[in-house]
Structure formats: C-alpha cells, structure tokens
Amino acid sequence: AGAYLDGIENLPPAIQALLLRSLDSREVTPLGSNQPRAVDLRVVASTSVGIDRLMADGRLRPELGYRLAGPQLTLPPLRD
C-alpha cells in the first residue's frame, strides 16, 4: 500500500506518534477493530520547508523525520 502525505509540518504530535508507530511496527489497527493488521507501506511526504528545518524547529518529531528523510526532491516554487 502507498500513502501520500501533504503538508507533514501540520501533523499534530499525536498523529506523528501514530504514524511513526505504524511505520516501525508495519502494522495498523483498522477503525472498529481491536486486531492489528500487517501492512507493507510506502510513504511519499511533501512539505513547504525542508525536513531538517522542521526537526530543528521542533515541528516534526526527529524519529519521524529520519524515517521520512529518504531520497529528497526539491522543486522550485511555481512563481519561478
């Protein structure tokens, strides 16, 4: 399965913790269920600021930042 997360700098800390737990354990618990389910998850995340800066500012958990900081693609703003 794949997921696209837009604007990860706006994720509340509680949601960041849940996402990190799911990425580490490779399990999710569907709504209405008490049983975790194994998943093979690929994540593509976007942000308007670099991940390193988000972690330095305290807006992104460092553990999550390191998990998401794979290959990075920097695109210029549309105005350019």
Image (cartoon, helix red, strand yellow):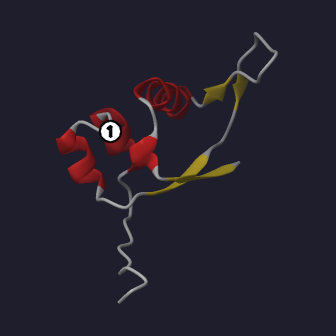
Label 1 residue SS = loop
Residue plotted at (37% across, 61% down): 48
Residue plotted at (52% across, 34% down): 23
Q: How many numbered badges does the structure rendering display?
A: 1
Residue 78, quarter of picture: bottom left
Residue furthest to the left: 56
Residue plotted at (38% across, 56% down): 70
On the rendered image, what quadrant is the C terminus found in? bottom left
Above or below, 3 against 46 in this view is above
Q: For this rendering, which residue is in front, 79 or 73?
A: 79
Residue furthest to the right: 32
Above or below, 43 against 18 in this view is below
Residue furthest to the top: 34
Residue 33 placement (x, y as % from top left): 80, 14
Above or below, 18 against 75 in this view is above
Q: For this rendering, which residue is in front, 24 or 55?
A: 55
Residue furthest to the front: 79
Residue 5 placement (x, y as % from top left): 55, 51
Residue for badge 1: 60
Above or below, 3 against 40 in this view is below
- 3 left or right of 13? right
- 72 left or right of 26? left
Q: Residues within 10 Å of mark 1 (few under 14, many from 20)?
A: many
Residue 15 placement (x, y as % from top left): 50, 29
Residue type, numbered disc 1: Leu
Residue plotted at (45% across, 47% down): 8
- 22 left or right of 51? right
